[in-house]
Image: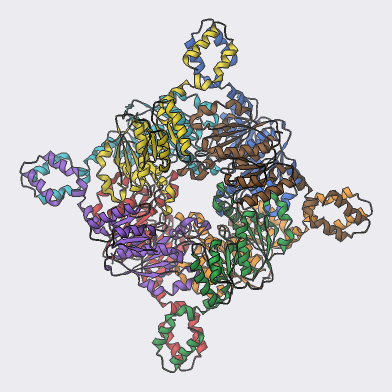
Chain colours: A yellow, B cyan, C brown, D blue, E green, F orange, G red, H purple
Amino acid sequence: MTKSELERDLESFRRGEMSADELVARLRAEPFEDLGFAKLDRHREMRQGLSEVVYGAGKTADEIIAIVGRLKTMSGRPVLVTRMDSEKFPKLVAAIPEARYFERARIAAVGEFPEPDARGEIAIVTGGTSDGAVAEEAAVTAEALGNRILRIYDVGVAGIHRLLAHVEELQRASVVIAIAGMEGALATVVGGLVACPVVAVPTSVGYGAAFDGIAALLSMINSCASGVSIVNIDNGFGAAVVASRINHR
Amino acid sequence: MTKSELERDLESFRRGEMSADELVARLRAEPFEDLGFAKLDRHREMRQGLSEVVYGAGKTADEIIAIVGRLKTMSGRPVLVTRMDSEKFPKLVAAIPEARYFERARIAAVGEFPEPDARGEIAIVTGGTSDGAVAEEAAVTAEALGNRILRIYDVGVAGIHRLLAHVEELQRASVVIAIAGMEGALATVVGGLVACPVVAVPTSVGYGAAFDGIAALLSMINSCASGVSIVNIDNGFGAAVVASRINHR
Amino acid sequence: MTKSELERDLESFRRGEMSADELVARLRAEPFEDLGFAKLDRHREMRQGLSEVVYGAGKTADEIIAIVGRLKTMSGRPVLVTRMDSEKFPKLVAAIPEARYFERARIAAVGEFPEPDARGEIAIVTGGTSDGAVAEEAAVTAEALGNRILRIYDVGVAGIHRLLAHVEELQRASVVIAIAGMEGALATVVGGLVACPVVAVPTSVGYGAAFDGIAALLSMINSCASGVSIVNIDNGFGAAVVASRINHR
Amino acid sequence: MTKSELERDLESFRRGEMSADELVARLRAEPFEDLGFAKLDRHREMRQGLSEVVYGAGKTADEIIAIVGRLKTMSGRPVLVTRMDSEKFPKLVAAIPEARYFERARIAAVGEFPEPDARGEIAIVTGGTSDGAVAEEAAVTAEALGNRILRIYDVGVAGIHRLLAHVEELQRASVVIAIAGMEGALATVVGGLVACPVVAVPTSVGYGAAFDGIAALLSMINSCASGVSIVNIDNGFGAAVVASRINHR
Amino acid sequence: MTKSELERDLESFRRGEMSADELVARLRAEPFEDLGFAKLDRHREMRQGLSEVVYGAGKTADEIIAIVGRLKTMSGRPVLVTRMDSEKFPKLVAAIPEARYFERARIAAVGEFPEPDARGEIAIVTGGTSDGAVAEEAAVTAEALGNRILRIYDVGVAGIHRLLAHVEELQRASVVIAIAGMEGALATVVGGLVACPVVAVPTSVGYGAAFDGIAALLSMINSCASGVSIVNIDNGFGAAVVASRINHR
Amino acid sequence: MTKSELERDLESFRRGEMSADELVARLRAEPFEDLGFAKLDRHREMRQGLSEVVYGAGKTADEIIAIVGRLKTMSGRPVLVTRMDSEKFPKLVAAIPEARYFERARIAAVGEFPEPDARGEIAIVTGGTSDGAVAEEAAVTAEALGNRILRIYDVGVAGIHRLLAHVEELQRASVVIAIAGMEGALATVVGGLVACPVVAVPTSVGYGAAFDGIAALLSMINSCASGVSIVNIDNGFGAAVVASRINHR
Amino acid sequence: MTKSELERDLESFRRGEMSADELVARLRAEPFEDLGFAKLDRHREMRQGLSEVVYGAGKTADEIIAIVGRLKTMSGRPVLVTRMDSEKFPKLVAAIPEARYFERARIAAVGEFPEPDARGEIAIVTGGTSDGAVAEEAAVTAEALGNRILRIYDVGVAGIHRLLAHVEELQRASVVIAIAGMEGALATVVGGLVACPVVAVPTSVGYGAAFDGIAALLSMINSCASGVSIVNIDNGFGAAVVASRINHR
Amino acid sequence: MTKSELERDLESFRRGEMSADELVARLRAEPFEDLGFAKLDRHREMRQGLSEVVYGAGKTADEIIAIVGRLKTMSGRPVLVTRMDSEKFPKLVAAIPEARYFERARIAAVGEFPEPDARGEIAIVTGGTSDGAVAEEAAVTAEALGNRILRIYDVGVAGIHRLLAHVEELQRASVVIAIAGMEGALATVVGGLVACPVVAVPTSVGYGAAFDGIAALLSMINSCASGVSIVNIDNGFGAAVVASRINHR
């Protein structure tokens, strides 16, 4: 129910063409979408960028094609498919020729990414090469959401000088995404070097008692550095959304 | 080594009063504080607000008095003592008469809090009354860091209308701190209602299989809402630092 | 030992054709089935609906055919095979032509489902599309047990308005089955909206620290909403049995 | 906003005393309580019995007196205070003379309990004497909610004949609450004996690897008996609410 | 060093053909095998039955053939290969024609099993059909160790009358092996019915929160029945060794 | 219903003084205690030694006195109270003068212990002095159940020669109880030295990652030695019951 | 049995004063202490420094006095009592006047510490002030074992420059003990800065999801730096023993 | 910036060809590599042996060839590729003919191993044959780092005499690597037999409650033997680095 529909209803009621009961019934019928939750609707418009993200894991190529086609029609914005295996892409690109594939990020995208519309820059820092897939998922997502990205990869703290060589860049960033597996110490050291918020992403990289990311998760959540908050294990996408929201403040 | 000391050394070297070896030795002697890490120093100045925070748990009143006295002298900024038991306060206020005590927050403070210097507002939302201590720790910390706070307490999602009554306020906030124990569902519902970053704080409130906050921690880290990141269990202080950094972007 | 057999034995004893020792020996020989546990037998009749359920995982098509054939002969009621892979169905239907297959639910059924014989309705609510298999296992099982089902799928609480649009339907239900993975917050929000019992089913949907359903399980078991009880991870069948028993009160 | 207030507002609007904008603003101002969520309000009335329950742990006697006083005024129904230590009761009864204390249940109550208004009976079964406090919390809560209770205590399955002696009583019950610590096997055995829903409550009774109820929780959630759902460790109150809702179907 | 070798050495020493230093050196050279640990050797003879058991998992058919061949030569006793996949057996039987394969138990055996040489009987009880592989591993092992076995399968406690029908048989047993997955309640109920030792084996049967046998393990280790001890998850072999040692007392 | 009562009833029935319905009703009334489960009763007589054990933790001195008094009257056998704090003993001995207290074992006993009536000996082995309380609980319990005990304490495997000095004694035992905390390696080493059953008891001795006995529990349950089964953490009593049953085979 | 006793026995045997059987019996009687394990004895002498350490937790002052008195007599070396509460010291020093107490380390010592007899130095590094007790336990123990200690405290990696200021000192050390709680990242950063072995000690410092040291333990065991091994949570003593052994290579 | 570059810059500055600001800017530009962290560089040279290790898991044969080729050019030292599947080796050896493959260790090596340059010997002890892969990873790594290795395999403590037969060899070692799965008791027994440092490696060998090495990890970290520190599960490489550093002290 748009605002004009509401005004028309109220007018009908005033003119006696609609009873009070009828009016109340209409108001109740879709109360959240239209009246009480019009704010929700405005909110949903604000997050359009997100609503066009499809979680590709466990979906067939055909399902993905159908969903992407529908989303593309509904909005003029780019559509992302995360966690999509490379072998599904040929079928997707055959159906939707403008589709692109970011291999490392395991993301397929349809539609141009917007120009960066936030003043700051998101720095993405990783501990090792194996964290690259999670980092690229974060990077591509953040770019699709209109952010400038600075990639600082393979600067794990076991060789602290590698990270220290990038201190000035880190300190210029608007927000830092720190991605590491194993003992996850990167988040703490980065947290101590910058004054901006740090979004930490534990990864499932590691073996033995790394327990698929639990060790890094516990390490990061207990970071003795202030200003660090975390997202789920391997959740590069989630970190990018948080960082993008911060960067667009 | 201050900048003027460095310049004096360079001048000495140029005039031949100091050999190249001596100069290099001096540069190496404290390289991070003074030269190579001058940026760290500038950075530290930027976070002065944080460096004056004392973790009070496990410290005696006398130790707290000594540390607060020293910090107060070193900077003109307010000093916070977190996790301080109320019974230590009389001794503290006897020694430092300007000290104030925030009982619910378990925080003692010395020195005036700054005027809010960030444009936005931090909304602090809690699930139940038992989350109040963590919420107040966050609120007082954030105020001391120069933020305006909006408290929305006791709006747990088991009675969803209580939370929904505050949707507009939440949507105006610059960042939301969502605090809940038990099943921690609040973070997810709030995350779905707002477009700003949400910092979630699991609390140790609950019993049985709540496991002192693990249930809420797992719930929040797995939130199906985007834009949510988390800090440690009961870590109201940490959430406030993250939120303040976001709010000061 | 049927009642008439018992009476015949007692008569033989009275007439001296059977000694006291013989009688006691006979009574002891199968005491639970026939005498002491006649109540158990009656009870078993009461739950016939359940005894015809076969857990299909780990059984070959041949084993399933054999068991279903026997069960079908023993009772006039429908036989369900849960957790049955679709590739086993062709063999089953070849052997038992009346067999049907519910693909999403992974259930094969032989025999007509009964007309709903309970007054109320079981509402089945899910958080996301990935919870659909568990939901359908619950739905098909509940239908086979004589219940009317209302499916309300994909109403996860990260977009709370989706769930709220169904409040009236939920409040009409006799019992609600709430199915969600990830952070499992759905159970709590639903629990706060209805006055009937809620049976919560954590699912293994999620990644990272979702730990195959542990996060949702802990979340649901700690729900701050009253009236919520839970069954095992992914146990749509179990939830349906509990809900059907409630609905048939 | 009551229905009559709404009608008055609509009338004002129709008569031109209130503009369309004013009307919409008023409708939006408290939309859930009064318009869109009037159903919630009706619902809340239906659960009044629950809203008068106070969780006493961690509250002072004075806080409890204040809350109970207020709740008593707001409704004519009994008020329960759960998890209340016995040493707080003298102060409570001094302030509110009609207060009673159920020692084993650790529940204080103000106001007469209603006559049982459900047809069936709730059977409460425990494994051992140490489960008594949880059982009584369930029993007193259920009585306050208008249920008839049958107590079958100390029938742990290590001596199965103790439980079997009560089979007929159990089979007459409308719903069974099975309470056990240690290995929690009681829930499974009871679940196999009855055709009604079983609400299982793991207790923290046990030592060593009982892990404060985790062993019993896992045992019960994995019960091979159908028709069993569980609530949190030691949560006698929660089990009673679930059972009462079932019993009032 | 055999006893005769020792005597020869001592004789050499006495005759002066060997110095004291040489004698001590010889005694020290292999002190445990031959002198100090002669008791160990005798002990090893006593457990010959065990030393001929090969853990087949992770070994190739060729490796198994080599080991079995050697063991067979070294002793006259039967050789067991546990956890051996059926597809390795054709190669084994081609090399060692007398080899037999126990399919359900996943055990290959070479050599006749001894006649039962213990007075008592080992009863093996299982909760469900899925526990059969573990049960058969226990049964075949125990038979190979010279025990008489009584199999009582599929008597899970969710239908307690199935177990009670076998009470007399259970009470005649010398030791009972109770095998169950899921909630593992069988061990407790059996423990309450018999006066002999019960060896409980948790199995990895179950799903969801069964956690591959942890639920059953915790349940069994916390059994409220006395006289129950447990072995590792799915360890039918280990249970058989314990039971056989008890039965041979 | 004793056997003579049963015979009297049957006689009444035969003489027509009791109808068939009455007889069946009587048989059903207490079927397990008296008819169907007479074997249970005989069994219970066999385990009298156990039924007179009271778990003292969490019981007041008065409760203990009442229970012990009753048990003493019911049977001529000794009564044990386990886990009883020493400060409760003065009150107990004042009420029941013949009571004795085993301080290390935290066991009070009333009535003479029987002469050892089993041929073999139970060896109790501990890793360190801190395991002494658990060991003495096992030792006193086993003595009360009619076993001869051999105590071999403080022979932890970090100094393997201490244990090896007792090999012959260990090998003479009928069953060994191996008690250790920390890493629990004692059970494995003992298991490799003897041919009799080993009952392992993990203790909560240790700190840090010992996790109150979990480390020892996991270590023992995974023992690479055959013939080892375990009981709960710190459960000296349970180990004694298992060992006594083995020793009385 | 000393070497001279052995020689005397052999001589007796040679002269025919002792039969071969008697000789073998004597050799077997205490074979490990005296013959077969003479090497163990030599070994024990080598570790005398360790055998004079008493674990004070859970021992009374009187027990400690007795043990220390005996140990002091048995060897000329210093005796340490670790984990000893300060309130027990007055009684100890009254009985043994030369006793000293290291308050932060919670260690009492009797006897002079040896001069450092290892070439290198053990650096002890901590993350925060709260790690001090563990660090001092390590430091005092290592000094008692004859090592030179370099204390570098409060250099947690959240302020990396604090640690970097000590790089040269760290690189001169023979072995580094890295002690940290919370996220335990210190071990990894230190491990990347030095070429000597690093012994990492997780501490129970932290709150929330630190889980009494588990987070730090997992972090350290998964360190991406090579050359790091760990000891138990809070085990300063154990780290000192490992470091001392390395330093005495 | 090399030392000569630094000297040239300083000379330029002295001659006025470079301003003080320029000089400081240059010094800051790469301060760690060249000035402040020259010590880091020297350190890196010291660990060259390590920097040539490639973690092969998850890398393609082509990636490995590229990395090995580059590393080989950069230094004259051997290059190791750990965790490399055997099927990748043919491609590697085709590209780099001098490559060798250690099958059990899953390590490929290019370049001659250095002569042992440490005085002592590293003893590698394993519990069972299944620990062999981890042991060989440790052995080959340690050899590549210039150590002499003593392999003592399959001496698990369930047959303690197997281990005791090697006591003298163990006691001659400079450092012992103790490798075991299941209950991991080997580390403790070895720790009690030697005076040198013991590096314990838990392996994922085992089943049931071994939990992929957690049981062994907990066992080893809680070892009651002094002088034992541990590395990650299955981390033979890490153990070798620690041991080599100790051996090269």
Residue B217, position as x, y percentages in the image: 47, 41
Q: Is residue F155 visible?
A: no
Write down the quadrant of residue B201 in the picture.
top left
Nearer to us in this view, D160 or D126: D160
Residue C128, position as x, y percentages in the image: 52, 35
Q: In the figure, is residue A173 to the left or right of B227?
A: left
Q: Residue at x 11, y 42 (%)?
A: B8
Write down the quadrant of residue G247 in the picture.
bottom left
- Tell me: residue A69, above or below residue E188: above
Q: Is residue D159 visible?
A: yes
- Tell me: residue A12, above or below residue F49: above
Nearer to us in this view, D162 or E149: E149
Q: In the figure, is residue H53 to the left or right of E173?
A: left
Nearer to us in this view, B204 or H54: H54
Q: In the figure, is residue B81 to the left or right of C193?
A: left
**How many numbered markers are drawn?**
0
Residue C79, position as x, y percentages in the image: 68, 43
Nearer to us in this view, H103 or B77: H103
Write down the quadrant of residue A56 in the picture.
top left
Residue H150, position as x, y percentages in the image: 36, 70
Quadrant including the C terminus of chain H = bottom left
Q: Residue at x 62, y 57 (%)?
A: E132
